[in-house]
Image: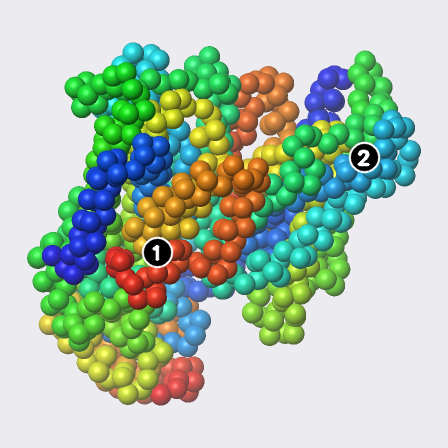
């Protein structure tokens, strides 16, 4: 193993231990809050496969988060299932299908058109969620009961909050760790190198024999699936799903926290997502003009700190992990 | 026998006949130089053959296959590779990864997403061998964006070479490099080409380089081939000296 | 027959506004090669400023005196002013950087402007329907048609003609076209590229603001109109090609017609028809119909 993975294991082991110990140390509310953060972090991982590693900036990733979430709601509503495994499977299939379709349209284009197309397509989904209100519950959304875990062996019992802050938290944490590991392998695989080559120099990649459109499409689908998994995990926490998560403002949040953490590193988006989760939770009570705050911070980030938090920390020699 | 043959190949941009019904032949195993002043059509010819742009008319045959309208991917599969006049590298990847990528691609392994690239010993070893041949093994872990210009030119060729092509186009491999560095770079390139049995077409402006390394020279002017012969024949060709050599800088 | 004319006029109305917005976007891209994701918000800003200005003067009265109409262009001027400030401060630092940063900063700008409009004018729509009704309507055959709509169509046509004349017949237009075709060459010939850029950007924002200003009597100023307009403007430039004014005109006309047809026959899926059209055009001809590569 090369140095970088060894270094990663070195500091991630204590972090993981801390995360495992968390529910026994902090109030349940904090654990649930962190669950939301981990969910957003999974979405960020997916999003950054496209941005940091393939060079494609999507403004429509809410479509896949929403596809995952609504898939869960439909599974409850139409199939009557309550198993988290069924939810995850449904989320993967739904977000994968949507990403495959949207990807076909989007990956043929340059950065600007790509960005707008992704935004437009996710807005179409959002408007469909309202138009077909008899299926989707319209603006009221659809309620989702607490699922059973591990094939029905773990059930919620009488205390829902206790379930969410312990057993469900560990489930989310486990999925999070799996997602991180899988994405780590993907970006360090030959495929991942091909993506980075496409990001750095599309023409040369073509001339090395990498069929650019095809690889971008595959990256798009994988990215959508990770985000869809996040959506599926999010619904039980939230108790219901509404069209908000399909709206472009939610896509904007994903862009924001990925850039905040630093899109040129592997762990940056994860850190950004978790920090953003706390920012949003604690600051949202202070101002209605939340979008403006995000916008101002984003502008400042671009002008002053384009490497994001983790990227800047790396630059100053603290070096949590090397990229590529 | 011919490895490559174009017949009446043509490409125009508006009113400019960049490549004007050119019949261009390359014999297997030879090393030839393609010379001409700026705008003569050399790079356009290479762009047509390598597949960057489609021709307006004419035909390209490679080892008996009609590749006139073939995709870039197909041409690479068949064994055509190129380097670029303005260095085209993957600046965010290490030197080693740049070369390894070409090998992965050649082996069809870029489809693998669940195995670590670094874990593939065979590819790593082959990349190391290629880097050694190009004198870049000391820079293997450096990001391509951090190399000197001469190193970048070499890496550019190394990446194309790692595709193990049968026919290699090198577009100005020593441009932008100091005079001192040109000979070492060309020495490496010609050694690699020779030992690999690769047919090479080198676009060059530096006539010293051309005369020294290339047994055959094809001179282009305003989209057509002006002359085609050995260095002596070219040196003594009046049309060539009038149109091209007078304007060459050493 | 009459209904056909009405539909045609509606299509032209929509096309006029879309031309103003998309034309501005295309102009900016053509000259500067940047895309401002907040462009739709400048249209919205123009709408809000005009509605607010007229509303202040109108007070609670419902009489639309003629010179109130003269206040409408204020929105365009305000949008232009905003653009003149934004380009040197937020966009110029990023010209040498990767394109992603331009998209990110203009996205940030989009977020800021959305909430800025909410902050200044509140979450409820601003209406100035008095101006819309003030011009009455024309009767022809068995149909009546609001005269104001005809005014908008007229303005759209004048804008197209004026812009064409400006770009192709004036000294500044020559400079603009030269800079858009070859920035370095123009600079080497003594053109102050920075000044051309800010002027082009201002002009593009003016057009967007004008689009908002002229349509606000008909549909009011409402939060979220900016992003909807942005997406639709992109549909127009996808069809007509980014960077081409003629393309923006053709694209706007096509979008106007398709939208009108969509609303009439398939009111439920009108939006989808437009996106479908854009997708089809993109699939066949990626640079749009008249775009530059």
With respect to residue B56, does A175 lie above or below? above
Q: Quadrant of the C terminus of chain A?
A: bottom left
Question: In the rendering, at what x and y percent does residue B195 appear?
Answer: 11, 72
Q: Which mark is residue A7?
A: none
**Residue A141 picture quarter:** top left
Label 1 crowd bin: few (<14), some (14–19), many (20+), radius 10 Å: many
Residue sitting at x 23%, y 48%: A15
Residue C120 appears left or right of B32? right
Question: In the rendering, at what x and y percent does residue C20 appear?
Answer: 68, 42
Label 2 crowd bin: few (<14), some (14–19), many (20+), radius 10 Å: some
Residue that carries the numbered disc 1 in the rendered image:
A310
* SS at mark 1 in the image: helix
Q: Quadrant of the N terminus of chain A?
A: bottom left
State which chain disc 2 sits on.
Answer: C
Choose between A175 and A119: the one closer to the eye: A175
* SS at mark 2 in the image: helix
With respect to residue B248, does A46 lie above or below? above
State which chain disc 1 sits on.
Answer: A
Question: In the rendering, at what x and y percent does residue A72 appear?
Answer: 33, 22
Question: In the rendering, at what x and y percent does residue A11 appear?
Answer: 21, 54
Choose between C120 and A164: the one closer to the eye: A164
Residue that carries the numbered disc 2 in the rendered image:
C55
Residue A178 appears left or right of C42? left
Of the residues tagged 1 and 2, which is closer to the observer? 1
């Amino acid at each position: 193993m090369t140095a970088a993975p060894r270094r990663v294991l070195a500091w991630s082991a204590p972090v993981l231990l801390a995360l495992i110990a968390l529910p026994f140390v902090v109030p349940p509310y904090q654990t649930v809050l962190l669950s939301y953060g981990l969910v957003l972090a999974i979405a960020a991982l997916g999003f950054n496969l496209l941005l940091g590693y393939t060079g494609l900036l999507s403004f429509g990733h809410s479509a896949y988060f929403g596809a995952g979430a609504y898939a869960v709601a439909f599974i409850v509503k139409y199939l009557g299932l309550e198993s988290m495994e069924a939810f995850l499977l449904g989320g993967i299939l739904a977000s994968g299908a949507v990403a495959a379709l949207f990807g076909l349209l989007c990956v043929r284009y340059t950065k600007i058109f790509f960005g707008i197309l992704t935004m437009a397509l996710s807005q179409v989904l959002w408007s469909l969620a309202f138009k077909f209100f008899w299926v989707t519950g319209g603006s009221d959304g659809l309620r989702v009961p607490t699922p059973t875990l591990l094939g029905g062996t773990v059930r919620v019992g009488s205390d829902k909050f206790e379930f969410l802050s312990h057993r469900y938290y560990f489930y989310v944490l486990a999925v999070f760790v799996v997602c991180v590991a899988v994405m780590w392998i993907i970006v360090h695989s030959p495929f991942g190198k091909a993506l980075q080559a496409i990001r750095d120099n599309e023409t040369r990649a073509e001339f090395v024999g990498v069929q650019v459109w095809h690889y971008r499409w595959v990256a798009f689908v994988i990215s959508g699936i990770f985000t869809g998994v996040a959506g599926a995990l999010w619904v039980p926490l939230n108790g219901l799903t509404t069209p908000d998560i399909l709206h472009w403002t939610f896509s904007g949040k994903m862009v924001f926290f990925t850039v905040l953490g630093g899109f040129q590193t592997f762990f940056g988006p994860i850190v950004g997502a978790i920090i953003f989760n706390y920012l949003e939770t604690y600051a949202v009570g202070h101002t209605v003009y939340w979008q403006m705050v995000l916008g101002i911070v984003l502008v400042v980030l671009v002008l002053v700190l384009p490497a994001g938090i983790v990227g800047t920390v790396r630059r100053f020699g603290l070096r949590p992990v090397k990229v590529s | 026998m011919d490895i490559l043959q174009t017949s009446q190949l043509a490409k125009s941009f508006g009113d400019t006949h960049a490549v004007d019904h050119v019949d261009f032949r390359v014999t297997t195993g030879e090393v030839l130089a393609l010379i001409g002043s700026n705008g003569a059509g050399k790079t356009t010819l290479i762009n047509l053959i390598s597949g960057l742009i489609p021709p307006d008319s004419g035909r390209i045959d490679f080892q008996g296959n009609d590749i006139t309208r073939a995709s870039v991917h197909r041409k690479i599969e068949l064994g055509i590779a190129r380097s670029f006049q303005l260095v085209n590298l993957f600046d965010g990847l290490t030197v080693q990864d740049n070369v390894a990528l070409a090998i992965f691609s050649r082996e069809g392994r870029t489809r693998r997403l669940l195995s670590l690239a670094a874990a593939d010993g065979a590819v790593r070893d082959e990349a190391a061998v290629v880097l050694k041949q190009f004198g870049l093994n000391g820079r293997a872990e450096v990001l391509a964006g951090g190399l000197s210009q001469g190193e970048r030119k070499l890496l550019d060729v190394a990446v194309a070479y790692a595709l193990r092509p049968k026919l290699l186009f090198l577009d100005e491999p020593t441009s932008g490099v100091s005079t001192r560095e040109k000979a070492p770079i060309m020495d490496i390139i010609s050694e690699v080409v020779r030992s690999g049995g690769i047919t090479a077409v080198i676009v060059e402006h530096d006539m010293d380089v051309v005369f020294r390394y290339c047994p055959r020279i094809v001179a282009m002017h305003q989209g057509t081939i002006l002359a085609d012969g050995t260095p002596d024949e070219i040196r003594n060709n009046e049309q060539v000296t009038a149109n091209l050599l007078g304007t060459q800088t050493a | 027959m009459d209904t056909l004319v009405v539909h045609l006029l509606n299509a032209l109305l929509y096309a006029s506004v879309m031309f103003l917005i998309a034309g501005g976007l295309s102009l900016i891209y053509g000259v500067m090669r940047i895309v401002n994701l907040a462009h739709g918000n400048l249209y919205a800003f123009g709408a809000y400023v005009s509605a607010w200005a007229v509303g202040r003067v109108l007070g609670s009265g419902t009489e639309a005196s003629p010179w109130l109409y003269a206040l409408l262009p204020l929105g365009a001027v305000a949008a232009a002013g905003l653009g003149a400030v934004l380009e040197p401060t937020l966009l110029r630092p990023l010209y040498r950087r990767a394109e992603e940063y331009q998209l990110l900063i203009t996205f940030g700008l989009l977020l800021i402007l959305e909430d800025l409009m909410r902050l200044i004018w509140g979450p409820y729509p601003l209406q100035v329907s008095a101006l819309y009704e003030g011009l009455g309507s024309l009767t022809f055959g068995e149909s009546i048609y609001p005269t104001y709509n005809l005014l908008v169509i007229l303005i759209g046509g004048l804008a197209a003609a004026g812009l064409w004349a400006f770009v192709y017949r004036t000294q500044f237009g020559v400079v603009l076209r030269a800079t858009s075709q070859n920035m370095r060459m123009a600079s080497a010939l003594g053109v102050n590229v920075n000044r051309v850029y800010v002027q082009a950007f201002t002009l593009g924002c003016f057009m967007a603001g004008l689009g908002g200003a002229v349509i606000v009597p008909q549909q009011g100023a409402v939060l979220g109109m900016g992003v909807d307009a942005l997406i639709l403007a992109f549909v127009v430039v996808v069809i007509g090609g980014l960077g081409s004014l003629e393309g923006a005109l053709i694209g706007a006309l096509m979008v106007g017609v398709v939208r009108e047809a969509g609303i009439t026959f398939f009111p439920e899926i009108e939006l989808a028809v437009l996106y479908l059209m854009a997708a089809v055009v993109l699939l066949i001809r990626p640079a749009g119909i008249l775009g530059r590569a």
